[in-house]
Structure formats: C-alpha cells, structure tokens
Image (cartoon, grey):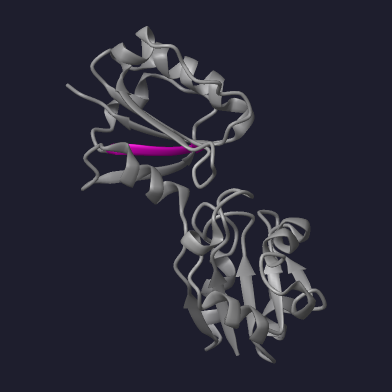
Amino acid sequence: MTLYLLPNLLAEDGEISLSIPAGVEEILYELDGFFVETPKVARKFLKHFDFDRLRDKPMEVIDRKSEDFSEHLKLLKSGSYGLLSDCGLPCIADPGARLVYLAKNEGILVEAIPGPSSIFLALMLSGLYSQKFTFYGYMPRQMDGGLRRDRSLQVYIQTPYKTETTLQNLMDILEPRDMLCVALDLGSKQQQVLTHSVKQWKKMQWPDLKKRPAVFLIQTRT
C-alpha cells in the first residue's frame, strides 16, 4: 500500500543511466499499476526497461482536469502504484499533488524517488545567484513591467510554441542591465543554457527558438 512518485526523463533522447536512479527499475516491476499523465508517453518511458514485464500493468490517468480521486485511493488501498508525469518529477508544476495529500490523509505511504527537474537543472546551469528564487509556473499571458518588481530570481516555464515570442516580449519589458537566462531543451542532446544581460541579448544572434521547451530565469537589477 504505497504510492511511489517516479521520475521521468525530460526529453525522449535523454540518457536514462544518468537521469533515473538504478533502483527505479526494480520498483517498476513490483508495482501493481500506474497513475499517469498521458498513457502513450508513459509507455515510451517504460520501454526503456523490460517492457514485457510492464505492458500489462493497468494505467489510470491523472491530469490537470482530474478532480475525483476516489478510484485512485481505492486502488492504492489494495496495492502499490507509481505516479508518472510526462516528463521530470510529478507534483512539481505537474499533476499529482492532490492525490499525494489525500493518500497521506488515508494513511497510505508515499515515497518520492529523486530524478531530473527542468527547474533545478536551469537553476544549476544558469550561473545566477539562486540562494533566493521564486518559481511562478508558466509565464503570464499578459506580461508587463510588473516582472521587474520582484527582486528575487524569478523562474518561469513556457510551452515550446511560445518560446520565441516570450523572449521578444521580455526584451521590451526588461531593462538592459537585467540578467536573463534561457534554458532550452533541458535533458536532451540539443540542450542549451544561455545567460546574458538584456543588453547583450539585444545585440547577439539568437539560436533557433521555434518549438523548443524553455525555462526562463530573470534577475532584475536596480
């Protein structure tokens, strides 16, 4: 009767031996089933292991629209299940937090397995001072000068099709002295992490940004 919070790769071409703890494989085989964000994506991840031992394990969907977890809790009370997001870690800007809360209240053991996180990889690779930072989730739809009022390091994620537009908008909002890191395709072979002042960003030639998932880190300066 355990809920395992399982790590997933950040990108399909990620190196599993460097990203996923070795002990995860044995946990996968012992589970009675999975709670997944997207079954197709979950199966791609499971194919990195002995899929013949995993293909018949049941999958129940947990996504951003999920509200009723009664069936999930019923399953957990009769066995052990793994929670698997489409990429990275569950519950961190991904579905699952509500199930964790309810499971703990029911006395169900919850185990978190460490793994890759685009948020923390971006912080590590940015070179920016990260003793104090605020993660805001997705970049706001309406971006304005209010971004500059927060003096802590700001961290945002963005959907791939908005990466280029977001960077263009930030050039209009931020001051030349502000620092901006754009972390692209984290965990993949195409990974790029670029940290420059806004003044430098405006002068340089940008990499191809189309359809590339990104994490944006903003450090404003007085």
Q: Quadrant of residue 146?
A: top left
> What percent of the width, then of the height, locates residue 17?
51, 63
In percent of the image, x 47 and y 57: which residue is there? 116
Nearest to the observer: residue 5 or residue 125: 125
* Outermost residue, right side: 56
Residue 154 lies, with reference to residue 102, above or below; the image says: above
> What percent of the width, then of the height, locates residue 154?
34, 37
Nearest to the observer: residue 203 or residue 50: 50
Left/right of residue 201 with respect to residue 210 in the rendered view: left
* Outermost residue, left side: 222
Left/right of residue 200 with respect to residue 192 in the rendered view: left
Range shown magenta: 153-157
In percent of the image, x 65 and y 86: which residue is there? 30
Nearest to the observer: residue 172 or residue 203: 203
Determine if the magenta segment contains residue 56: no
Residue 1 lies, with reference to residue 123, above or below; the image says: below
Prevailing secondary structure class for the magenta stretch in the rendered image? strand
Nearest to the observer: residue 13 or residue 112: 13
> What percent of the width, then of the height, locates residue 97?
54, 65
Left/right of residue 62 with respect to residue 191 in the rendered view: right
> What percent of the width, then of the height, locates residue 86?
64, 55
In percent of the image, x 57 and y 60: which residue is there? 8
* Outermost residue, top side: 203
Quarter holding the C terminus is top left
Quarter holding the N terminus is bottom right
Q: Quadrant of residue 181?
A: top left
